[in-house]
């Protein structure tokens, strides 16, 4: 029997990307921070995002059928803390947001940002598993090498200058 505390401890050792999942409803931005985001398929270009059913933005994201996924660089660690702590539309204060095809807010300083439409949803116990098809990708030159992870209840800055980067070309 796996106890919930053991599961939580295990997940704390599971470093994940820091992303802002966003939508816009009736002119008001809605969103949440998420690490449960992963690549799904290149054709069609798609991601999976797992959103807690209790999250205040959950229903709005599903209703709207579109979402932005902005991957935060280490340079935005202070904003990441704000985005995680603030509530409602206040989360979006203190950063620049831009809009592409769907109307989802995308973080201007992101390492990469995805403009997506929801193609499918699946029940994932406490979460909804969202299959998001990518309609546009923002690939800014700034922050391309910068990375922020969530690990053991804290943000970890990762940058090529400060981190030993393992050789990955043979993987
Ligand atoms: C680093 C971090 C990662 C998180 N990852 C997820 C996630 O992947 N999915 C999710 O539904 N909530 C995740 N959460 C929780 C949400 O960001 C949010 O705090 C929670 O849904 C409550 O939001 P609300 O106050 O808008 O309801 C994460 C929180 C933090 C701080």
Image: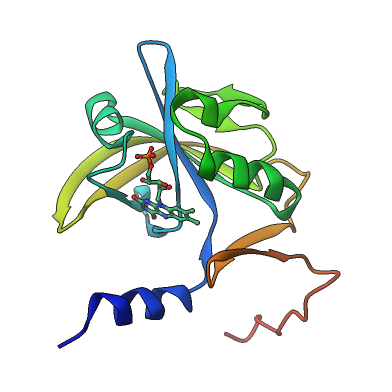
According to the image, what is the colour scheme of the structure?
rainbow
In the image, residue 96 sits, relative to residue 130, either above or below, namely above
Please count the marks in the image: 0
In the image, residue 167 sits, relative to residue 80, either above or below, namely below
Relative side of 30 to 123, left or right? right
In the image, residue 109 sits, relative to residue 6, either above or below, namely above
Please tell me which residue is depicted at 71% across the width and 40% down the height of the picture. 140
Query: Could you say which is closer to the camera, residue 43 or residue 70?
Result: 70
The answer to which image quadrant residue 94 occupies is top right
On the image, the x and y values in percent for residue 27 come to 42, 11
The answer to which image quadrant residue 65 occupies is top left
Position of the N terminus by quadrant: bottom left
Relative side of 128 to 80, left or right? left
Please tell me which residue is depicted at 24% across the width and 40% down the height of the picture. 119
Relative side of 155 to 127, left or right? right
On the image, the x and y values in percent for residue 152 come to 53, 73
Position of the C terminus by quadrant: bottom right
In the image, residue 26 sits, relative to residue 120, either above or below, namely above
Name of the residue lying farthest toward the top: 26
Please tell me which residue is depicted at 40% across the width and 79% down the height of the picture. 9
On the image, the x and y values in percent for residue 154 come to 59, 64
On the image, the x and y values in percent for residue 71 come to 57, 48
Query: Could you say which is closer to the camera, residue 70 or residue 154?
Result: 154
């Amino acid at each position: 029997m796996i106890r919930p505390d053991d599961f939580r401890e295990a997940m704390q050792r599971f470093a994940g990307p820091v992303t802002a999942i966003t939508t816009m409803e009736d002119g008001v931005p809605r969103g949440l921070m998420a690490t449960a985001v992963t690549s799904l398929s290149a054709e069609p270009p798609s991601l999976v995002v797992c959103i807690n059913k209790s999250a205040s933005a959950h229903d709005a994201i599903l209703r709207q059928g579109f979402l932005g996924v902005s991957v935060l660089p280490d340079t935005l660690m202070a904003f990441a803390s704000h985005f995680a702590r603030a509530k409602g539309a206040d989360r979006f204060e203190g950063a620049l947001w831009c809009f592409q095809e769907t109307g989802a807010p995308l973080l201007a300083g992101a390492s990469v940002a995805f403009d997506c439409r929801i193609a499918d949803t699946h029940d994932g116990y406490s979460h909804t598993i969202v299959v998001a098809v990518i309609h546009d990708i923002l690939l800014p030159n700034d922050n391309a090498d910068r990375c922020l992870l969530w690990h053991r209840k804290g943000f970890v800055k990762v940058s090529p200058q400060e981190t030993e980067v393992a050789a990955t070309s043979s993987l």
